[in-house]
Amino acid sequence: MAVISTIEQSYVDQFNANLVLLLEQGYSKFRGTVDEMEVTGEGASRDRVGSVNSDSTSTMNRITSRHSDTEAREIPHSRRWLYPLTYDEATYLDKVDQVKMLADPKGAYVRRHAGVIGRTLDTIILEALVGTAVAGQRGGSSVALPSGQEIVHGGVGFTLAKLLEAREKMEIDEVEDGITRYLAVNPKAITDLLNEDKLTNADYTTVMALQAGKITSFMGFEFIRTNRLPLVSTGISKCIAWTPGAAVLGIAAEPATRADLRPDKRYMWQLYSWMSAAAVRLEEERVVEIQVDHS
């Protein structure tokens, strides 16, 4: 009786298990910092409910006389849209290459696929936070981030004054106390802070710990270091402050991978990963773009 080998299927299962584990360990730095929704079909919308009388600072009507008419005020409704795009990545693992290598590269290939998935998700989220949002009843209009939510670079890098201004903008916009405030910065921005003359000794010590990765918070923000910040132009990047609820990530197909032996490629391994996702900004008041000049 012939013995049927299942070793290839074991390899396939291990590929998949390893990728899922790596993704769960946080290869995306920004997934989890915004809302998330499942998308079915070509696109999806998220309805928004504004403040009474379109004014977040308004108070209730005061009754000044008996038996007076009720005064009603509108609560505005609006809609944002996202349209997932599909992404993939494929890598061949040739047996000829394998026999020349001292170590089996399969695990390293899985880590590389997990990394590119995470970086793609991060780019989708960051670009949505400061990009143009698709809006309207049927997605026929667009909303850019208002200039009032931008701190222009002014020919200088990341400064304490810009950080304080970003915090002030969020407080003016009535961002709730106690809610997490994220801040995406690149390594150069943290170096800029360390060169800031206005830092106190305690601030300097904190930023040093921030640079070393020993802490993540400073001035009320959770710092997330990344090299994927959107650009204003060459040498000028956009550090981004936001809160959960500022944007939504739509997942039409969760990141997935499979490994197959390719008969058409002399039975070499192919590692294939794919996903379908998009994101859109929901509330401009929850986002502040901090432009920094690194040129």
Image (cartoon, helix red, strand yellow):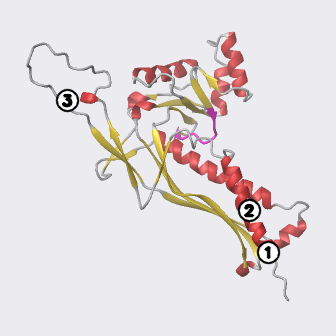
* Quadrant holding the N terminus: bottom right
CA gap, disc 3 to disc 2?
58 Å
Query: What residue do we see at 68% from left, 12% from top?
Result: 202
Dot 3: within a 10 Å radius of its alpha carbon, few (fewer than 14), some, or many (20 or more) residues? few
Quadrant of res 133: top left
Residue 83 vs 272, above or below: the answer is: above
Q: Amino acid at mark 1?
A: Thr
With 129 as the anchor, is 192 left or right in this view? right
Location of residue 285 in the rendering, given as x and y in whole percent from the top left corner: 40, 30
CA gap, disc 1 to disc 3?
68 Å
Residue that carries the numbered disc 1 in the rendered image: 6
Q: Is residue 50 on the magenta stretch? A: no
Labelled pair 2, 1 in contact (Cβ < 8 Å): no
Query: What residue do we see at 57% from left, 59% from top?
Result: 275
Which residues, given as a range, are shown in magenta? 224-232
* Quadrant holding the C terminus: top right
User: Extreme right residue here?
Assistant: 102
Q: Is residue 226 on the magenta stretch? A: yes
Q: Amino acid at mark 2?
A: Phe
Dot 1: within a 10 Å radius of its alpha carbon, few (fewer than 14), some, or many (20 or more) residues? few
